[in-house]
Amino acid sequence: MLSLYLHTPFCRRKCAYCAFYSAPAGEETKDRFLAAMKKAIAGAAEEEKRPLSTLYLGGGTPALLGEERLAEMLQAVREHFVFEPQAERTVELNPESTTPALLQTLKDCGINRISLGVQSLNEEELKILGRLHDREVALDALQMIFEAGFTNVSVDVMFGLPGQTAETFGATLDELLAYPVTHLSAYSLQLEEGTPLAENAEPMDEEREEELWWLLCRKAREQGFEHYEISNFAKPGYASRHNTAYWKRTDYIGLGPAAHSFWKGVRYSYPEDLAAFCEKPWPLCTPQSVSQREAVEEAIMLGLRLKEGIPLEWMPGGFDYTRYEAFGRVENGRFALNERGFTLSNSIISDILYRE
Amino acid sequence: MNQKNIRNFSIIAHIDHGKSTIADRLLELCNTVEQREMEDQLLDNMELERERGITIKARAVRLDYHAQNGEDYEINLIDTPGHVDFNYEVSRALAACEGAVLVVDASQGIEAQTLANTYIALDNDLELIPVINKIDLPAADPERVAHEIEDVIGIPALDAPKVSAKNNINMQSVLEAVVEQIPAPEGDPKAPLSALIFDSYYDSYKGVIVYIRMMEGTLKNGDRIRMMATGAEFDVVECGYLRPLGFEASGILQAGQVGYFTASIKSVEDTRVGDTVTLSSRPCAEPLPGYKPCTPMVFSGIYPADGARYDDLKEALAKLKLNDASFLFEPETSVALGFGFRCGFLGLLHMEIIQERIEREFQLDIITTAPSVSYRVTKTDGSVLRIDNPTNYPDPAEIAMTEEPFVKADIITPKEFVGNIMDLCQDRRGIYKNMSYIDDNRVNVHYELPLGEIIYDFFDTLKSRTRGYASLDYELADYRESKLVKLDIMLNGEVVDALSFIVHTDKAYPRARRMAEKLKEHIPRQLFEIPVQACIGGKIIARETVKALRKDVLAKCYGGDITRKKKLLEKQKEGKKRMRQLGSVEVPQEAFMAVLKLDS
């Protein structure tokens, strides 16, 4: 199994909570980026002949490249790589840059899944996050996506936002899930050092955030979603295969500044530097081999994010699952966290790995 | 050097009255140290001493002085600590001298340790030379202080040298007074050797370096010597004088002199401070009086944070013990903390210093249990136990009587703070004795206090309630009957032996509550709820709960970047190393330390 991730590091403006690598860019820069990306795609394809199971265009804001460049980029992928039948091909969109024309272009290029960054449908919350859209723009975008004929649609929401309540979060969820979305990603707000939001906001207290968590789990369940990963819910058959590659440690090649790869047992990452990427788009940068011990820790850490959990034989010696009865279960020779355990996964994982 | 031209003296003073600065100036006057090598507080050569601005260990140094009478003198200066915890060090230093310079701050006047040290000096029949320091301070009143010394101590002081060590004013008069007023040592260089060990120092190349005061006879390189208390014998490798920046080998030391020797001594057990050194071939008849054995007053357990470093800790303690006769330790075990040591200290400052030295000089992380005094427990069968570790406290049903140590405390303070001090002492179960005026403004308040109430934070509280003006000195008085109980702490239903302590019944409840609160503050939320309970004999008297963690998850894993997750995991792994696993509860080392400071 092979996944390909293409990272577009452009944003019109940085959101108040965002610590990822992105920057505004002019036309010329975008051209240079596209040229480099095409070289990277060609370079990767030289050394990797397996068909792609998944493709994911993320950012940043891929739509900022414009329809033509996006089409060209996707064309390059199709030229150099073979897709598996039914391969999952996702583009990440923001509501304000979603247009019928863009959607048509994506569809024509073979994109079959859209991930829309809604985050919230509450005006106050959107303002605090520094998003460029308001609730109407978000709902319009969602409408357009379905009208364009996409049937596999994911929406992102955030919880733990300053001022957010069970009421506002519940309303966002209700309204979004009234659409035929097939996938829901729900991230709790992390106040990242150096972001404007971290300077102005206090983290929500654990009890309140926990209340939102259970609200999320309940509403998703009621709408027929499966909680297949800590932050991700899907209608049956619609779990994101691309993201699952990350948790299951199958091979993925990430191209673009700041993109990460895990390829043939080695981790790579491009520096957060557009110029450096344009200069030398291939091969992958800063290889870091993964030791046997690290591999085990990674497998446990990532595998326990999934509802299906991990085989018991991966667990360290002396693992006593009765200690974690409140947080998970053992079934068919696998240990998996439940929704209670998901919320405490950091502590549980380090407890499993490092408890004396 | 002719014996009549030798002078051996100490400088004694209350803390901060300028003793170490005076020592620096005297060293300069005698050109003992080149100007370029001169550092402030040269005798305080332990890093910790300079940082804290205090002298912990006594140091000795030889000065060569050309006096105004035209003669050359060998002057041995032995520096002493000024803090109440270190009175024992002072008495060791003074036993090696014929005289002492008593430094009094011209603006502060007599303080508690001025008196305490004076009494030790008088006990040793030393000639006292008062010196009034810091005369250049705006608040200085040397005349008043001179009268105070005459009135309170009863020695002539109107002609005392009035100096400023900081600004080098009139410093020569101190050396002149030393030469003129302090008697030369006595002792016959031809008599059988007897030398008093007053300090020692471990050097990794030379072995133990022994500081001695020659009382009788002569010591030479190659001599076979015997330690009279232990009977151990050694061959002297090197002997000589103590210089500020090292040792000056002379090959010979004679009666009256102060110096050092090395003899390839490896074992801590063989050199005992206070012991008498004599010649194996021609021993002296009687050992020197030595010292009153020092009595540690405060006890606590010291454990390696990492159990695997037990042997390193043991070695560290042994080395510290070599240089610090007042520090005692023996192995003990704790269910909670594993293998460690029960240690005896002179006081709380002494304890803090030992802890800091273990961590700094030996790079060891340690966990210290709550300090305790030594209690006396009479059981119903008539046997009497000394209890300095709460773990050994007998079942209350077997106890007929409990006693705790009391001290006599002198607190010198400006009179406007007397009310505050009385409140504090009352609160600490003190018994008021009386009060005497030192001058119009300052009084000496005498209290009897349970030592157990002083060892926590009495000194800090005293300072804060008197804006830093009050000074304290105390000495052990006696044991008195007292209603004591053992307080246990349970985490998640299990008693943590390392957190138990003995406390007066009246103080048990507030102490228990504070302890539970402090632990709650310092134990991080974990996967499970943790009840923190304080109990006496199984009866719970205070309870707090460390609530279970509710949410601890790193949601986003953008574009397959798992480095942040790995970093977080690494951080948690490091965090776990600083935790002690007690049953199912993880307790950070800080929690053990924090409960030592219950009032802050």
Image (cartoon, rainbow, N blue to C red):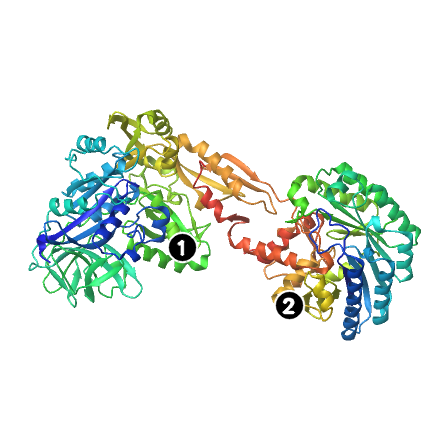
Which chain is indicated by disc 1?
B
Quadrant the C terminus of chain A occupies: bottom right
Residue B105, image x and y in percent?
A: 26, 37
Vertical position of residue B162 compared to residue B569: above or below: above
* Secondary element at image label 2: strand
Dividing the picture into quadrants, the one containing residue A313 is: bottom right
For disc 2, the chain is: A
Instruction: State the image coordinates of residue B241 (x, y, percent, origin top left).
Output: 19, 59
Q: Percent x, y for residue B446?
A: 27, 29
Residue A131 at x, y = what percent? 77, 46
Residue topped by disc 1: B360
Q: Residue at x 19, y 58 (%)?
A: B259
Q: Residue at x 24, y 52 (%)?
A: B28
Residue situated in front as seen by the camera: B10 or A24: A24
Tell me the residue that label 2 is attached to: A288
Tell me the kind of residue under disc 1.
Arg
- Tell me which amino acid carries mark 2: Gln
Give the number of callouts: 2
Q: Nearer the viewer, residue B333 or B86?
A: B86
**Secondary structure under badge 1?**
helix
